[in-house]
Image (spheres, helix red, strand yellow):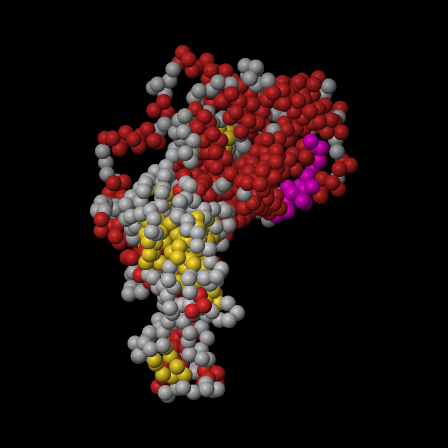
Amino acid sequence: MRSGNQHYIVARPAYSEVSFKEQNQQVERYHKTAQDHLRAYFRCSTAKAKRIFYTFLPIASWLPGYNVKEWLPNDIVSGVSTGLVSVLQGLAFALLVSVPAGYGLYAAFFPVLTYFFLGTSKHLSVGPFPVVSLMVGTVVNRLVTDGDTGVNNTLFPADMSGEDRRVWVAASVTILTGIFQLALGLLQAGFIVIYLSDPMISGFTTAAAIHVLVSQLKFVLQLSVPGFSGPLSVIYTLKYIINHITETNIADLVISLIIMAVVFIVKELNDRFKAKLPVPIPIEVIMTIIATGVSYAFNFKEKYSVDIIGNLTSGYQSPLTPNTAVFQQSFGDAFSIAIVGFAVAFSVAKVYAIKHDYVLNGNQELVAFGISNMFCGAFRGFAGSTALSRTAVQESTGGKTQIASLISAVMVMIVTLAIGFLLVPLPKSVLGALVIINLKGMLLQFREIGILWKKDKYDCLVWIIAFIAAVLLGLDIGLGAGVGFELLTVVFRTQFPQCSVLANINGTDIYRNRKDYVNIYEPEGVKIFRCPSPIFFANVDFLRTKLIDAIGFNPLRILRKRNKALQKIKKMLQKGELMVTSKGYIQTTDGSYESNSENKDNNSIEDLDKATDMKELPMKIDWKSCLPPGIHIPSVEIHSIVLDFAAVSFLDVSAMKGLKSILKEFVRIEIDIYIAACGNLILDKLERCGFFDDEITPDIFSLTIHDAMLCILDKHGPSNSVSFIYDKFQFPQKPKVTASFPRNLKFQFSFQFGSDKNKRTKKKALKPRKATKWRKCIYSFKEEPAEDLVDNRNEGLKREIIIEPVPIAMNVSCREQQPEVQWVNGTKETLNSEGELKKRTCLVQLDTQF
């Protein structure tokens, strides 16, 4: 069944909100109060205790159902593969934190143990992540300075070595990061990540990749680069490297280039043939083993002055008490690290949760990461999240549960306790090269700029600003700037929405932007204005301006001019300068001083903004007819305005006040206001806030735009029309209709008057071919003219009726019906050169009775 081939018929009254509620009883719902929510939150029951237990200890829900026979072999293979990657990434990312490489193994081991019990993701590999590691390293470089002249040396004991200071700062920042994450999780604040959009995260992580790349150049080139921090640190680092580029160790550079080239090629092969390979080729592990063996065999450290990682910390050390002074110095940094680490990990976990069809709990993930970071920091590790490549290895090699992560932690422990000494001759340039080559995925995010520009320019700007801010201002300040600009774009979109004027699609009850369609119908004297955003204090004035632009005049200026004219007419009547007759007002003076008297009027703005009061006048003033000489009021052709509020989700107090003021301005110049498709919550709020009064009533609210339009056509229909010759006539012959045609149509009848000499006496009955193709039909007949319209020379009048249908309602089936024509609008007269009536045109409505 193709869309557009099916039709539906609906017969119902045209409803306003008031009439709809009168005919349809609403369900009385009880809305819970804050006290009800607190009572439910602290209520105790067996089911609730069980739910809380499984929430805070997710392992209890999946471990009893673990399929050892089917899942354990896959988890073992995945755990071994992931463990090898974790060892290398732990060693490499420790360089980003500016701590000895061995502490990276702690960061790859301890968080896995706690996440195994507390995490809700089955595939996430928890551990070091380059962006988070670099953010921790930024704090370390800022608080720990080289030498004894640093301004922050008072944070540490005087006899503490620089290495121990760096480890202490990294551990303290990690513990504070965990505290933030745990607090957010207990406060059920997992929703906070929704403020980090995908373009913002992409731009930020790309900038972080630039920071990581620059920070690893000192290992690739083996340059002693001071730790720059703060805004423009990347610029200062690059400047220093360029100035000292001649000091590069060629051996380290060659080793790095070889490692990057080989790893890049093999990774591309892994991606191309991943469907045929049982597991990806662990090229990083292979190249690390080869580089370590070659470095040991040829004694790179002595012969070529290659910098090696040296002795790794053997075993595990006792827990460390955090430095509270570091807490004070790194409060903002730790919060940024907590948000970024969780946002990256949750976004990666969500991808695999959707792929494998299981549910993540964002709040529990915060708790799991918080406790994991606190546990890791206590044992001298640094903050972690997840590495995209490491998690991809765990999932692609067949990992089913977190048991694979536990096995990878066992692999890291084996290296730490038993075989770590074998990695002593490993060059640091190898780790730097591995870090750089693993940035490929993040650096390729530059391609998103062109894609986002085509899809959404606001999102593209968010990406660019987040990237530039993070590169130039640093990751901590850059994150805040990126989030701030992102929220600013949301405010900008709602503050300056794309308002539009709607029109009816012919033959339907559908209304769309009149600029987008050809077959549209715009009723004369009606404007349909669509507001596509919430209305609040920041955009209510903008919407007022857009509405005035759409209407074509300022209602407040019209109202003030009318009140000024009304006061002037009252004064003229009091002075006897104006008389009232059956034909209207007649001025009894020449009016030579009118402009002067008008200039002398000192009318207060408050009086001019009130509704026009004609109680003291002998007759009502028709502002559309001729006014007394000297009084000129702009003509208003609009009689109704429909406001489409379907997209308005909320109104604040300032918006309600501004909206009421706008509506009253239109009402006071005799323009009917209709508000369509307004939500019940907004209507209830308007009722509670006393929005309605004698001028603004609930009757102005309609269910749909079409309901409002039908009400307008009914109000401005035959009863308000101007009579022309006959107020009603019928076709003398019943039209032959062989197909369905619209129930209510609008026709443009053009009545041509001519002399008897030039007329043609041929009569033609109205016989349209098909109702669906009814465009123009001519029906002629002879009839005696009315004496008050033509002179004796025009005897023998011929009327030529040209019918152009414009449907405004839904189709209904009808056969052999008698249409009745009625006048629904005013007439337009055309005179010839001698002042005689030549043509009169009026708008009529064809109503078919069923």
When asked about the image quadrant of residue 303, the answer is: top right
Dividing the image into 4 quarters, which one contains the C terminus?
A: top left
Q: Quadrant of the N terminus?
A: top left
As drawn, the residue found furthest toward the top would be 69
Please tell me whether residue 262 belongs to the stretch shown in magenta: no
Residue 743, percent across and down?
Answer: 34, 46
Report the span colored magenta. 220-238
Q: Residue at x 55, y 27 (%)?
A: 389
Relative height, residue 168 to residue 433 (above, below): below
Spot the residue most to the right.
246
Left or right of 575: which side holds 33?
left
Given residues 697 and 524, the one toward you in this image is 524
Is residue 224 shown in magenta?
yes
Residue 556, position in %: x, y?
43, 68
- The one of 754 and 232 positioned closer to us in this rendering: 754
The image quadrant that residue 402 belongs to is top left
Q: Position of residue 710 (x, y in %)?
A: 34, 52
Count of labels in the image:
0
Horizontally, residue 761 falls left or right of residue 24, namely right
Residue at 67%, 26% in the rendered image: 260
Q: Is residue 490 left or right of residue 574?
A: right
**Can residue 755 be spotted in the picture?**
yes
Q: Is residue 640 left or right of residue 198?
A: left
> Residue at the spot x=61%, y=37% of the render?
446
Specify whether residue 203 is in view.
no
| Residue at the image position 29 percent from the left and 43 percent from the top | 11
